[in-house]
Image (cartoon, rainbow, N blue to C red):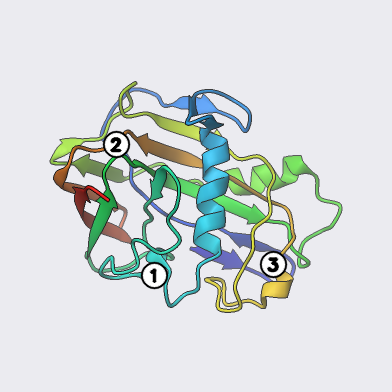
Amino acid sequence: MFKKSSKVMVWALYISLITAGIAAPSVSFAGGKPKVLGKTIGEWSVKWWQWSLAITTASNLMLDQTGANCNVGQKGQVWFLAGVWGGAADPIIRNCTVPKSKYVFFPISNGVWINSLWDDPNNTETVYRENAMAQVLTDNVSATLDGQPIIFNSSTPIIRSQSPVFTATFPTDNVFGADSSDLNGYPIVSDGYWVMLPPLQQGQHALQFTAGQSQNITYNLTVEKP
């Protein structure tokens, strides 16, 4: 989901995988702990955005109805999942095969700010972060893994984290429908709730999440040996 005006463009990705837990989440800013595989959650959020924004609309998991594009752009020890770009009125079921021993990383609800040519070039990093923070949605959402609520705890960490300032490479056919030259190279920050799941056991798993009226997604995950 994104908002656009003639003077300013704010892009917010509403990807909602959240908890039914009642405890407060941890807060981790760009350089903060905890670290997973040598990176903070904020640093992993950069990797996630760079992955998602670099993929064309034709192959982007955020626009995928079935999960056929689940493996596009995946590399390294962490596997990325996404919600629906802009939301969807109807439930979506995705089938996704995840190699065994991969961590699984996804946003609960997050916002992103790109200080592009439409924005004031004198904006400071503080302004970037305020604009990203304003997009984070935190209410009326829920998620389960194998029928069990995902909660705020040490074994299934859900972290509110800001990213460092970063840039991304946008394809010609990008999710914003904008000229890539209007997006490439501009400073970006994000803020949101993120989940880093440890590697899942081999076999079948169901990850289901809802948010408001625009996110109702089930991932049927098959974890198998590479």
> Which label was assigned to residue 63?
1
Place residue 142 in its image quadrant.
top left
Place residue 126 in its image quadrant.
top right
Q: Residue at x 33, y 46 (%)?
A: 17
Q: Residue at x 66, y 70 (%)?
A: 5
Residue type, numbered disc 3: Leu
Regarding residue 1, the answer to whether it shows in the image is yes
Mark 2 neighbour class, 10 Å CA radius: few under 14, some 14 to 19, many 20 or more: some
Q: CA distance from mark 3 to mark 1?
A: 20 Å
> Which label was assigned to residue 178?
none
**Disc 2, SS:** loop
Q: Earlier in the sequence, mark 3 or mark 1?
A: 1
The residue where tag 3 is placed is 183
Q: Earlier in the sequence, mark 1 or mark 2?
A: 1
Asked whether, in this view, residue 79 is left or right of residue 174, the answer is left
Q: Residue at x 20, y 41 (%)?
A: 145
The residue where tag 2 is placed is 199
x%, y% of residue 83? 36, 57
